[in-house]
Amino acid sequence: MSIRIYSIDQQVAGQFDEGRLVEQKPIGFPGEGSAVERVGTLFYWAWFQAKEDAYLPPHPHRGFEIISYLLEGHILHQDTLGTERSLKTGSLQVMQTGSGVQHSEKYEKGTSGFQIWFEPFLGEANYATPTYSDHQEQDFPVETKDGCTIKSIVGGSSPVQLVADAKMWDVTVSAGQAFEMTIPDGYSIAGLVIEGQSTWCSFNETRSAEPREFVVCEGDAPGLLRMEADGGEDSRLILIQVPSVLPYPSYKEVKIRLKVNKEK
């Protein structure tokens, strides 16, 4: 198993609404220059923070499954499906954008969270009926074990089930304690350190990760991954498990095929 650490400098910065909303992107859009272009079905990952009240005007999406998970704050969501929803700390919204949808967001000052894109097979997803759903903090199962708090966000026992193969957890590891998980054969873990220092260990490698650093763990066989909170403080980690390799043609390949078919 390999463990790779990516500093903030190897990620991508972005902003909207004249800098009122800023982003740190562990995985940017193609061409933006992030060191990690994608991990399997995980296509894009942005950590947004509202420096002031901010507004993201209506804009379109198609095909991708897009989640927004709030670490803190408040968002007002509107879309062309007729949805008007208010989201608060710990909640999550899911847009399965299908054949196309537009949405806008209003961010309260101090709001922080993630927008993450997963890629299903777009040869089918592009023609599906778009949907919206959201879930409040109390909707997600939480397990406490050996000094760790594990909140299931996507997949498994979570109420959020995507078409794309993906699981996601929000994990807090108490100081001096460790969280262990087995990575299945053919899968990778993409992790973002939110708070605290942590040490990541596999059977043949040990690496340290600081807050805001991005970690990708990939193995060619099932393996145990251990994450320990060190430095005398708790560590909070966002962990996403996806196939190491996209198991179907990518959006680029689908786009090329659609273009060829139109020209025939």
Image: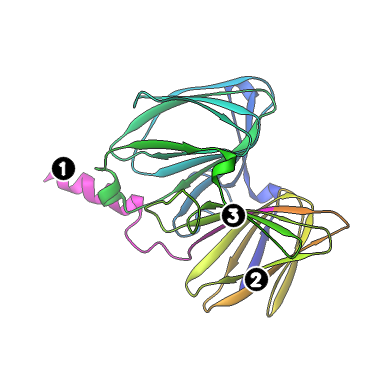
Q: What residue is shown at x 59% (from left), y 77% (from top)?
A: 223
Answer whether labels 2 and 1 touch (C-beta < 8 Å): no
| Residue labelled with disc 2 | 225
| Residue labelled with disc 3 | 169
Q: Magenta stretch containing residue 239, yes or no? A: yes
Label 1 element class: helix
Instruction: Kindly report the distance in space between the C-alpha atoms of the residues bearing marks 1 and 3.
Output: 41 Å
Sooner in the amino-acid sequence: mark 2 or mark 3: 3
Under mark 2, the amino acid is Leu
The answer to whether residue 131 is above or below residue 44 is above
Horizontal relation, residue 242 to residue 236: left or right: left
Answer whether labels 2 and 3 touch (C-beta < 8 Å): no
Horizontal relation, residue 230 to residue 112: left or right: right
Instruction: For residue 30, say whether it is visible.
Output: no
Q: In which quarter of the image is the N terminus?
A: bottom right
Numbered circles on residues, count? 3
User: Which residue occupies the foreground of this view, 139 or 259?
Assistant: 139
How busy is the neighbourhood of tag 1: few (under 14 within 10 Å), some, or many (20 plus)? few
From which residue to which does the magenta span run? 237-264
Counting from the top left corner in percent of width and height, residue 244 is at 48, 66
How busy is the neighbourhood of tag 3: few (under 14 within 10 Å), some, or many (20 plus)? many
Q: What residue is shown at x 27% (from left), y 39% (from top)?
A: 129
User: Which residue occupies the foreground of this view, 24 or 188?
Assistant: 188
Q: Which quadrant of the figure has residue 224?
A: bottom right
Label 3 element class: strand
Instruction: For residue 84, say whether it is visible.
Output: yes
Instruction: Kindly report the distance in space between the C-alpha atoms of the residues bearing marks 2 and 3.
Output: 14 Å
Q: Magenta stretch containing residue 25, yes or no? A: no
Q: What residue is shown at x 42% (from left), y 27% (from top)?
A: 103
User: Which residue occupies the foreground of this view, 45 or 139?
Assistant: 139
